[in-house]
Image: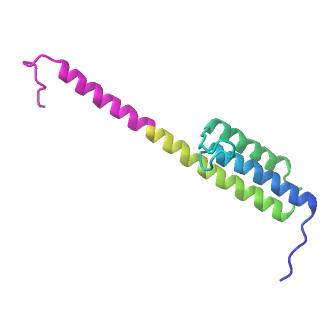
C-alpha cells in the first residue's frame, strides 16, 4: 500500500492541533511542564483549549482533509474524556476532604464535651 503524500498545509494543521492538544494535556496534569519539570494542573486552561479546538472543528467543517478531520476529532474526543475524568477526580477529592473535615470536627467536639456528657447511642 502506497503512502499518501501529505501537503505542507496539512502537516502544519496537524502539528497545530497536536500542539494545542499537548498543551491541554499538560493543563490536565497528564504531562509535565517541560520548562519546570513539574505537573502544573489548571482545569480552566484545559477547558479553554478544548473549547478552542471545538470552535476550530466547527469553523473548519467540510474544509478539512480526511486525515486533518480524523486528527482533530480524535484529539478533541481524547481531551474531553480526560477533562471529564479530571473534573470527577477533583470533585471526589473535594467530597472526601469535606467528609474528613466533618469527621474531624465531630471528634473535636466530642473530645471537648465534659466527661459526664458521653455521646448517647441511638
Judge left or right: residue 9 versus residue 90: right
The residue closer to the viewer here, 12 or 55, is: 12
Judge left or right: residue 120 versus residue 34: left
Q: Locate the N terminus and report the quarter of the image it occupies.
A: bottom right
Write the start and end of the magenta stretch as one range: 94-122
**Residue 20: horizontal and vertical position, in percent?**
75, 48
**Could you tell me if residue 110 is visible in this image?**
yes
Q: Is residue 11 magenta?
A: no
**Residue 40: horizontal and vertical position, in percent?**
61, 40
Extreme-front residue of the structure:
36
Residue in view at x 76 percent, y 54 percent: 18
**Residue 111: horizontal and vertical position, in percent?**
18, 23
When asked about the image quadrant of residue 86, the answer is: top right
Q: Is residue 110 magenta?
A: yes
**Could you tell me if residue 64 is visible in this image?**
no
Extreme-top residue of the structure:
114
Amino acid at each position: 500500500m502506497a503512502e499518501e503524500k501529505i501537503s505542507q498545509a496539512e502537516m502544519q494543521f496537524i502539528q497545530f492541533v497536536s500542539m494545542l492538544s499537548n498543551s491541554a494535556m499538560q493543563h490536565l496534569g497528564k504531562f509535565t511542564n517541560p520548562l519546570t519539570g513539574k505537573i502544573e494542573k489548571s482545569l480552566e486552561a484545559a477547558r479553554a483549549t478544548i473549547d478552542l479546538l471545538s470552535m476550530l472543528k466547527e469553523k473548519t467543517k467540510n474544509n478539512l482533509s480526511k486525515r486533518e478531520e480524523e486528527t482533530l476529532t480524535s484529539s478533541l474526543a481524547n481531551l474531553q474524556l480526560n477533562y471529564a475524568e479530571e473534573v470527577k477526580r477533583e470533585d471526589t477529592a473535594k467530597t472526601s476532604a469535606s467528609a474528613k473535615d466533618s469527621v474531624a470536627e465531630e471528634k473535636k467536639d466530642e473530645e471537648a464535651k465534659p466527661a459526664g456528657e458521653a455521646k448517647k447511642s441511638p
